Image (cartoon, rainbow, N blue to C red):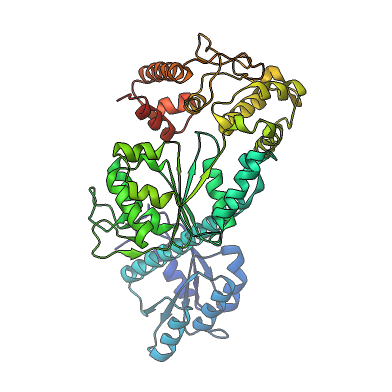
Amino acid sequence: MQPDDTSRFARLPILVVDDEQDNLDAFRLAFRRTFNLAFARGGSEALAMIDAVRPAVVVSDQRMPGMGGIELLTQLQERRPGTVGVLLTAYTDLPLLLDAIHSGAVHRYVQKPWAATELSLVLTQCLERFGMIEENAALRRRLSRYASYLEREQRDPLEFGALSGESAAVRSLSASIARAAETASPVLVTGEPGAGKRTVARAIHTQSERESGPFVELIAQGYDPAGQERELRGWVAGAVPGGLPERAGRLELAYGGTFLIEEVGALGPAAQRALARALTDGLVERLGAESPLHVPVRVVATTTDDLRAKVAAGTFDGALYDRLSVCAVRVPPLRERIEDLPALAEHTLLRLARRSPRVPRRLSLEAHAALAKYMFPGNVRELANVLERAAIHCRGEVIGATDLELGITRLTASAGASSAVASPSSQPGGGLSPAQGSVADGTAQRIDLDGKLEEVERRELLAALEQCHGNKAEVARVLGVQRTTLYYRLRKLGIDV
């Protein structure tokens, strides 16, 4: 049986070591067309070649003058751990061979005279073993780098830019976060879209005793009710359609850490029951499992919905709401902390500059004034989008008022407007100008802004869906929003596609 020449490991180098040239010639003749071979006359020559050849597999004769095969392979493991050793032997000194195998120096041994078919199979298996070892090592390195990145991001002050400022609203929020972090109780974080609820959840995690544990998230709007339950609970093999292998649920993955569920009000009945059981008893049962698992985890939930209204309407479990709201944190909208705009803008520009050094890091006085007059229905998220857009279009070192495209109809902005304090009429295009968004002059007239914005948003969404032939992923890309946000707005506006 010959190895598959198309194998991804077939061309990894093999070093063959023997003190007799005839044996090396026989090896070359048998396998030169199949494997990538290098040759050495004896152990000393082989060790001298190791760094240049970097072999995946070393095949050595056992009996050689000066340095035997076992000694060579033992030294090789110290020089290049992971290299697979194969010993060719005409002797049956089993205790010696077993010691070498147990030490890891020898992976396989083949008795002489060897048969080409048998040795070919052994070499192929050894190459695959080395390739898998290398791939696993590379994967571990990538995971280690990613874990380090996540840890840095989790503790990076710039990642908490939404909490910047010294306003009374932010000081009150910081105190609420500190109180929540001291407990192990569930936390319900409420606020308008884009206000920074997820940032608050991460701040609670990093300030708590669970900061060294995992921080696992689930966006409820991104799944249908069955998918929500699967993601929360996990499943055993064969328990879900499609024959998927066993997988842990998000609650189980958050063992010893924090589980964040975004927009908890979007959970279906089955997922609500699973979450309630985890909160009440600390138990999670995978779909299809015979017994539950004890999972110590801290749950933080965010919502833009009025959950009490959902409880009254019978669409959200009252007991689950009571358990979640043991510790409640309200995130103030940006219009309640306008004095924080300079600090928020500075943090946003610093984050942008980290990705692109050419990004302007300052705003002109006129730009600051324009931002202060705008209502920001999309809150901190909209501010970040406005500044990023301005940084892209700005050609100088300072962002001016003319670089700010305030009032552009954006899905993220109109999503937050439904709970914002409204002001003057909208423009024909559906956007709000800085002047129209201002409440500073006290002349704003009360109108039904919520209904008008939803009407504009529904019209824009339907037009985008028609343009993209119903492809939601393409609609999300065109509008510059996440798919989960798009799905949420479609459901909220009653658009069934």
The residue closer to the viewer here, 333 or 257, is 333
Q: Which residue sits at x=33%, y=57%?
A: 277
Image coordinates of residue 477 in percent, x first then y, are 46, 28
Q: In this view, does 287 lie above or below 56?
A: above
| Quadrant in the picture for the N terminus | bottom left
Image coordinates of residue 229 in percent, x first then y, are 31, 49
Q: Which residue sits at x=62%, y=72%?
A: 48
The residue closer to the viewer here, 460 or 437, is 437
Q: In this view, does 17 lie above or below 461?
A: below
Q: Which residue sits at x=41%, y=91%?
A: 95
Image coordinates of residue 138 in percent, x first then y, are 51, 58
Image coordinates of residue 17 in percent, x first then y, are 50, 74
- The quarter holding residue 224 reads top left
- The quarter holding residue 96 reads bottom left
Left or right of 484 in this view: 69: right
Q: How many labels does the image show?
A: 0
Residue 161 in view, yes or no = no
Residue 275 in view, yes or no = yes
| Quadrant in the picture for the C terminus | top left
- The quarter holding residue 346 reads top right
The residue closer to the viewer here, 208 or 337, is 337
